[in-house]
Amino acid sequence: MYTMTDQKQWKGRIDSTTNSSSFRLHQKVKRIPINDVSASDNQHAGIVGFICDEGVRRNQGRVGAASGPNALREALSGLPWTFNDEQQIIDVGNVLCLNHALEEAQRELGEIVKTLLSKKLQCVVLGGGHETLYGHYLGVRAALPTEAKIGIVNIDAHFDLRPYDEQPSSGTMFRQILEQDPHADYFVLGIQRFGNTKELFDKADELHVNYVLEENMTPENKAQIMHDLQQFMDHHDYILLTLCMDVLNAAVAPGVSAPSPFGLDPTTVRTILQKVTSHPNTHSFDICEVNPSLDENGRTVKLGAYFVYEALNNLLRGHGS
């Protein structure tokens, strides 16, 4: 269920071996088993991968996102190291979903997220299908006091509020959380009218979900959306951010399970990402549905890596830099 990352995932161009201002991520990221992680003071970040798309398979989507975490690492490797000398990014490896055991894999991911947060590291989870989010949530909840209020911010074309009485999938996570945790709330940006049934809109209203339709995410509405998002974040003790790459326009992100012709542009997603990861109560982020097998010229993987890099910079800048 758990394995360390291969060093070949972190390699690339070397401009200098002595001048840290010329270093790239692959020269600084350290691979450390989760049991050997030391406590930090919020100036370190831990990366964990979730090698799984069982939830996508159960949701009748196009599988392949299990290859996302290592593809993202390879795309991250060559990006410049822009962090302070005292800051550190570690890679604690991957959780694997074996023999379709999704629920067990989610619990294992939760244990790793809990460990990273309990040791005061910022946490970045590389999915995997969007079922990654439920394991991420389990770790956040376990690391917090029972009544701590969790605000989940999702950048996504889909509500993912389907029933889970038969089995959970990549389409059920937020309903699971909202029906099981009275101290969790949900704000989703980028919802597609064409990607969600009326039943899902009705369920969103029933569960008091805050949502913004893709068609309403315009420059004219930006100030109001950012105001509403800020208010939501300020009313919670912990902010969990999750990004499903299928929220983006299919022209810029073709390598996803469910491409969106009317999806968001990268700048809009980046603006939301910057705002949320800069909030003092945000300590974890996950990115999901990067499917290299469906990608064209690595566009989705590269864009996803840039989003991860943006999140890392903001998480570390806002907490101790």
Image (cartoon, rainbow, N blue to C red):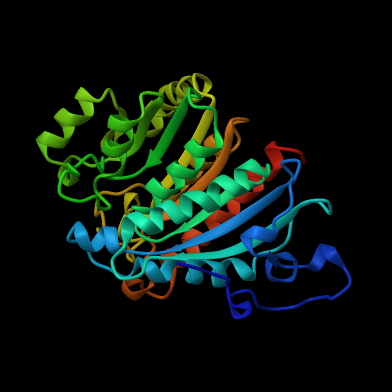
Q: Quadrant of the N terminus?
A: bottom left
* Snapshot quadrant of residue 102: bottom left
Res 242 seen here? yes
Q: With respect to residue 1, does 41 lie above or below?
A: above
Res 214 seen here? no
Along the viewing direction, whichever of 130 and 104 lies nearer the viewer: 104
Left or right of 207? Residue 238 is right
Left or right of 200? Residue 221 is right
Whole-percent x, y for residue 156 in the image = 33, 44
Residue at x 17%, y 32% (from the top left corner):
201
Whole-percent x, y for residue 126 in the image = 48, 58
Residue at x 20%, y 56% (from the top left corner):
59
Whole-percent x, y for residue 181 in the image = 36, 29
Q: Point out the residue furthest to the right here.
A: 18
Along the viewing direction, whichever of 92 and 25 lies nearer the viewer: 92
Residue at x 44%, y 51% (from the top left corner):
266
Left or right of 276? Residue 127 is left
